[in-house]
Amino acid sequence: MMLYASESISLHRLVDMKKIAVIIASILLGGMVICLIVFKTFTDNSIYSDMGVSDSYDGFEIEKVFDNHKGSPADGEALYKITKDSNTKADFSDWKKLPIDKRIVEFYITKRYDHVSSEIRKLAEISEGYWKIVGKNPIEGEGMKGLYGNMKLYIYDSQHDLIYCYVFDS
């Protein structure tokens, strides 16, 4: 089979276009990986700074247990489990002793029971330790003081030496 000059040039263009497509796809994939790393770093730093139990978080590790934000970073719930190594000290003196305020449990967990994951429901069962709420966008209305449209509820389970961070975004 004999190729004409015009067919040979078209074949070279096709090969060049495939190379360009591979380069563009690689750049896009690399950009997505960088975005995921930046988002995780931002999320971890936000959890640590709001937690406020240590000057250094070198001995801490965050594990995502649950997240239903469904692609939208603005609405949904997430649960993170924070572990620390045995040599890491944490100061919970600014936190409240468990149990969690009944209104907070009712508003964020039991009144929405059908919509809350089983992992989040278990938070209300932790009986020994401390808790702290960091809220934004206070909800207006009678009996709503201390409730927020966006919040992080931290719970330190002293029996298992674990910290949980429940994030609620609406």
Image (tube, grey):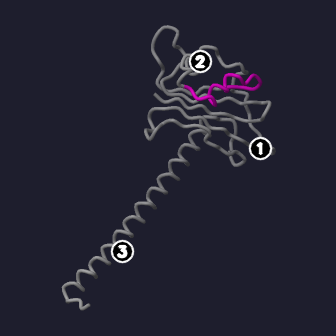
Q: Seen in the image, is 61 located left or right of residue 136?
A: right
Q: Residues at badges 2 and 1 in contact (C-beta under 8 Å)?
A: no
N-terminal label among 1 and 3: 3
Label 3: how many residues lie within 10 Å, few (<14), some (14-19) or many (20+)?
few
Q: Seen in the image, is 142 located left or right of residue 109?
A: left
Kindly identify the residue that appears in the image at 60 percent across and 35 percent down: 79
* Mark 3 residue type: Lys
Alpha-carbon span between mark 1 and mark 3: 51 Å
Kindly identify the residue that appears in the image at 77 percent across and 35 percent down: 161
User: Toward the viewer: 119 or 86?
Assistant: 119
Question: Does dot 3 land on a helix, a strand or a loop?
Answer: helix
* Mark 1 residue type: Thr
Q: Is residue 63 magenta?
A: no
For the C terminus, the image quarter is top left
Label 1: how many residues lie within 10 Å, few (<14), some (14-19) or many (20+)?
few
Q: Which residue is mark 2?
A: 110
User: Toward the viewer: 107 or 44?
Assistant: 107
Q: Which residue is mark 1?
A: 88
**Where is residue 38 drawn, in percent x and y?**
51, 51
For the N terminus, the image quarter is bottom left
Quadrant housing residue 47: top right
Q: Name the mark on residue 19.
A: 3
Label 2: how many residues lie within 10 Å, few (<14), some (14-19) or many (20+)?
some
Kindly identify the residue that appears in the image at 59 percent across and 16 percent down: 106
User: Which residues fall within the magenta stretch?
Assistant: 116-131
Task: Examine the rendered structure and indicate whether residue 110 appears above or below residue 44.
Answer: above
N-terminal label among 2 and 3: 3
Alpha-carbon span between mark 2 and mark 3: 56 Å
N-terminal label among 2 and 1: 1
**Where is residue 83 drawn, in percent x and y?**
71, 41
* Mark 2 residue type: Thr
